[in-house]
Amino acid sequence: MTAPVQARSPDKLPFLAPHFTDAVLRETRGNVHATLDLRRQCAVERILRGYVTEQSALGIRNAAALLLEVSDGTATVRAYVGSADYRDAAIGGQVKRGHAKRSPGSTLKPFVYALALDQGLLHPRSILKDAPSSFGPFSPENFDGRFFGPIAAEDALIRSRNVPAVAVASQLGHPNLYDFLQASGCPA
């Protein structure tokens, strides 16, 4: 006796961790060993979508996240979200934002603020200026083209404001950001 085969249409098939799946399939030949944790993956996707929705008034339309578990010097991927919505062409959803080329400035901001805290230049509630400013020939702008005016240091970091970060970096003593990065082994 044969039973009829019920095939699902592609839109009814599970669609899980598409950026991670694309990367694994592109880089792997033969057997696949993956370390993704589906529970964590779903949680990170949900948190990322919520963040983008909450921050849309600030012009944020997309985000990416990589969750690693580090043990004994080995990093294991537990969640990998390349964009807030893989299927949304308007935001380039299929582009892995974690691999996209961009300025490393926002990556460096936590180090700038940490150095400033260590040097006693500010504390989290210190008020900084987020307004048009010049530092020699350099006039930084914020990603959204707007300025908040007076802003607490912790909020400036959370909101990734460029002007306050450059102002704080310009006040650093020894080590300054360059010295710190050199000491950590980063190439010049």
Image (spheres, rainbow, N blue to C red):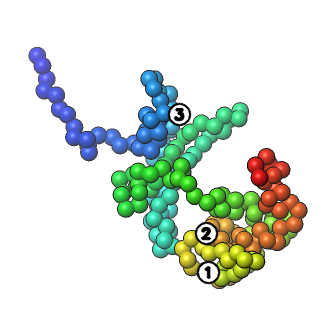
- Identity of the residue drawn at 81% across and 66% down: 116
**Which one is nearer the viewer's eye here, 168 or 140?**
140
What is the x, y in percent for residue 26? 44, 35
Q: State yes or no: discs 1 and 3 in contact (Cβ < 8 Å).
A: no
Label 1: few (<14), some (14–19) or many (≥20) C-alpha neighbours in 10 Å: few
Give the residue at mark 1. Answer: 148
Badge 3 amino acid = Thr
What is the x, y in percent for residue 147? 60, 80
In this view, the residue farthest toward the top is 1
Badge 2 amino acid = Arg
The kind of secondary structure element at disc 3 is loop
Mark with earlier residue (2, 3): 3
Measured Cα–Cα span from mark 2 to mark 3 = 32 Å
What is the x, y in percent for residue 60? 49, 67
Badge 1 amino acid = Phe
Give the residue at mark 2. Answer: 159
- Identity of the residue drawn at 47% across and 39% down: 23
Quadrant of the rendered image containing residue 106: bottom right
- Identity of the residue drawn at 16% across and 28% down: 5
Q: State yes or no: discs 2 and 1 in contact (Cβ < 8 Å).
A: yes
Q: Which mark is residue 35?
A: 3
Q: Is residue 125 visible?
A: no
Q: Is residue 43 left or right of residue 169?
A: left
* Residue 143 versus residue 178 in the image, above or below: below
Measured Cα–Cα span from mark 1 to mark 3 = 42 Å
In this view, the residue farthest toward the front is 137
Quadrant of the rendered image containing residue 128: bottom right
